Amino acid sequence: MTAKLLDGRKISAEIREELKKETSILASRGIVPGLAGILVGEDPGSVTYVGLKSKACEEVGINEMMCRLPENVTEKDLLANIDRLNKDKTVHGIFIQLPMPGHLSEEKALAAIIPEKDVDGFQAINVGRAWLGQKAFVPAVAIAIQEMLIRSGYRLEGKEVVIVNVDNMVGKPLASILSQDNNKGRANVTLCYPTSPNLAEYTRRADILVVSVNNPNLSPVT
């Protein structure tokens, strides 16, 4: 079988052009989408990632409102900032840049975001809605994988999809959207832990194999 390279940059550019048109229509109605992010501390990787998000917002016409907090911020102050953004009508979406310093509870912080503004899709209500096939925010990596497949001409219905990842950012949310009874789903999905001793028995039968593992030496098909 000949391998096909999916052009993520091209697909990303197409989606951004679509978003520009949508935000332009909203702007004509007096609505400017607002995205607020919370960054605690100055972790180099997080700072870089937030910078990319800010640039993307500017490109498509979204008002980016970054809330930068010191590394030693108390959990009380963090939750107060989340509450402030929840109540701000100019803020339509909120994300928390992870990881956060160890003295803070990521679980509490993510749960404090109201579901309607939880653009990362980590809040329990959004997770549940996604599995039920209801309208919900879903983690960006999962949606990106689905969009890359669909926009590259792959029909997922009836396909055997094996996902080597069982976390809350990739594996579980991707399974939740690919298995839905709609035109972007109806796939037969199997979730596998990368440590499974018989991993190759699952991956070899896959029509579509998704691997998201922090192990450069992993060989999922041998």
Image (cartoon, helix red, strand yellow):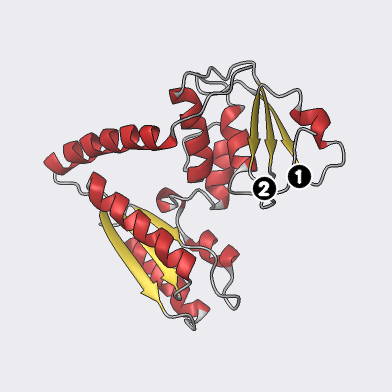
* Label of residue 86 in the image: none
Element at badge 1?
Answer: loop
**For the point 76% across and 32% down, which residue is it?**
221
Q: Residue furthest right?
A: 197
Q: Position of residue 27 (x, y in %)?
A: 16, 43
**Left or right: 33 as drawn, with respect to 202:** left
User: Where does the image place residue 162, in percent across and percent down from the top left?
Assistant: 69, 31
Q: Which quadrant is home to the C terminus?
A: top right
For this orientation, the residue located farthest to the front is 2
Total labels drawn: 2
| Res 158 → quadrant | top right
Q: Nearer the viewer, residue 193 or 7?
A: 7
* Residue 128 sits in quarter: top right
CA distance separating discs 2 and 1: 7 Å
Q: Could you say which disc has been placed on residue 213 in the image?
A: 2
Callout 1: few (<14), some (14-19), or many (20+) C-alpha neighbours within 10 Å? many
